[in-house]
Image (cartoon, helix red, strand yellow):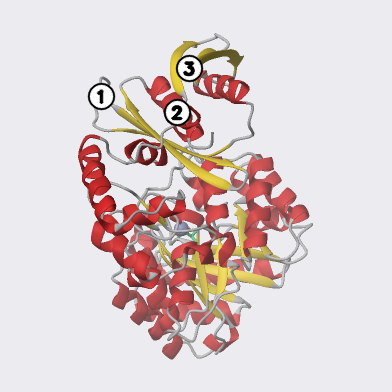
Amino acid sequence: MSDKIIVFDTTLRDGEQVPGCQLNTVEKIEVAKALESLGVDVIEAGFPISSPGDFQSVVEISKAVSKPVICGLTRAIEKDIEVAAEALQYAKRKRIHTGIGTSPYHIKYKLNSTPDKILERAVAAVKYAKKFVEDVEFYAEDAGRSDNAYLAKVVEAVIAAGATVVNIPDTTGYCLPHEFGEKIRYLMEHVSNVHKAVISTHCHNDLGMATANTIEGVLNGARQVEVTINGIGERAGNTSLEEVVMILKSHKDLPLHTDINTKQIYKTSRLVSSLMNMPVQPNKAIVGRNAFAHSSGIHQDGVLKNRENYEIINPKDVGIKESSIELTARSGRAALKHRLKILGYSFARKELDKIYDRFLALADKKKDIKDDDLRALIGKATRKDHKIHLELLQVVCGKSAVPMATVQLKINDEIHSATASGNGPIDAAFTAVKQIIKRKVHLEEFLIQAITRGSDDLGKVHVQIENRGTLYYGFSASTDIITGAVEAFVDAISKII
Ligand code: KIV
Ligand code: ZN
């Protein structure tokens, strides 16, 4: 059996089903190209019969992308299969993904049918899809809750009908990892023609077990994983690509690998997050903002001695420049000394002790300590080091109004003003700020979170910007989210200047 795990990405199909995540065709092509350079083997580009937009996207992605197999989803219905075949006509390598529910719930309550009739429909769908394409994948929907003996019968029949891949979805995210692994093992051992097809996993994260189940699947014989970037997807999402890929890469003891160019992971994650308006939770494994940030003194000291003391992944392997050492009240002398060294200052032990005491006093008042704070702390603050301050912000917005913003910034004691329009008040204000600072900054992340639920509560704003290849973070908390957003943006910019 091959050691290569085929990566089937369904960000543009299962991921795109999420409310609010819909993309237009141009955006889908951008994501598909990013997935191609990431090195995925299969892109599930859409469900062509579901809407004219989905149909067109599958057509355009088929034209724009040439290396991965392009796949279109269908139900076990002839019309669906015909429409998918038409949408895939320009794909260099194409696959139809057809299927039907095999669990008692789906057979009885969703399809109002019987196990024998479902088996017949499954075989007929695969045979019909084979008339259009060579590569046909069959999914046994809700396989996670299907009876293993019946599932094996269906899998054997669809492989005999020509299925090249058989997908075993845990549609409701119910299975325990060992149960899902046993299901795959059962199929590997009880389906006589299983060697003629690839068995695929497709796990959902309703109980937070999608990645664990997928890994159990491959450990028991599955050779394709169906995943999405950032784990987006129906309800609690799908298995996340970056987690599975980095598990296989980190565990050198496992004889399994993917062809993913892991250095593209972070970039792709950001692209999907921003196009789909789906913020990545800060503590998300591999791609969350805090995935490589160390804040406790013991951990910072350990990482500075040897990164591997507290990191199992080199951030560079996923395209993140470096781990970050956040200076907070929990930081120790080692972290402070390290940051001061980066800023070009070194101190003897006694002097460092004094600076450390002043640092702790400041850190008790201020959540995180920035470079300018450190310079001020050691008496090196100069006019040049002064931050930029937001002096005034005035916005015009509302239904039918053209969003406009006037911004005044105080830079080195001088007031600078600009007025700009935008697609909303925040966009207008950011444009005005950029006009004043006259630098190319690219907004990489923009996250607004309500601290509690009331309309009068504080909103926290995190901003990440890029300037000449370096990332800068900005933060603010305000009851006025527009002011908070602009303050966070200015906070990030003040670190460049
Ligand atoms: O979760 C699921 O069962 C699916 C199938 C349509 C493959 O997304
Ligand atoms: Zn799914």
Whether label 2 touches label 3, CB < 8 Å:
yes
x, y percent for residue 453: 24, 29
- Residue 232 visible, this angle: no
Check disc 3 and report the residue beneath it.
Answer: 413
Left or right, 126 with respect to 180, comes to: right
Cβ of mark 1 under 8 A from ligand 2: no
Q: Residue at position x 55%, y 8% from top? A: 401
Cβ of mark 3 under 8 A from ligand 2: no
Q: Residue at position x 39%, y 25% from top? A: 484
* Image height of 80 relative to 191, above or below: above
Left or right, 320 with respect to 346, comes to: right
Please state which of residues 249 and 240 is positioned toward the viewer in this rendering. Answer: 249
Quadrant position of residue 211: bottom left
Q: Residue at position x 38%, y 77% from top? A: 216
x, y percent for residue 152: 43, 81
Please state which of residues 218 and 257 is positioned toward the viewer in this rendering. Answer: 257
Q: Which mark is residue 457?
A: 1
Q: Amino acid at mark 1?
A: Asp
Q: Amino acid at mark 3?
A: Asp
Give the distance between the C-alpha atoms of the residues marked 3 and 1, in whole angstroms.
Answer: 32 Å
What SS does tag 3 mark?
Answer: loop
Quadrant location of the C terminus in the rendered image: top right
Q: Which mark is residue 386?
A: 2
Please state which of residues 259 and 160 is positioned toward the viewer in this rendering. Answer: 259
Earlier sequence position, callout 2 versus callout 3? 2
Query: How many residues crowd around disc 1 within 10 Å: few (fewer than 14), some, or many (20 or more)?
Result: few
Give the distance between the C-alpha atoms of the residues marked 1 and 2, in whole angstroms.
Answer: 30 Å
Q: Amino acid at mark 2?
A: His
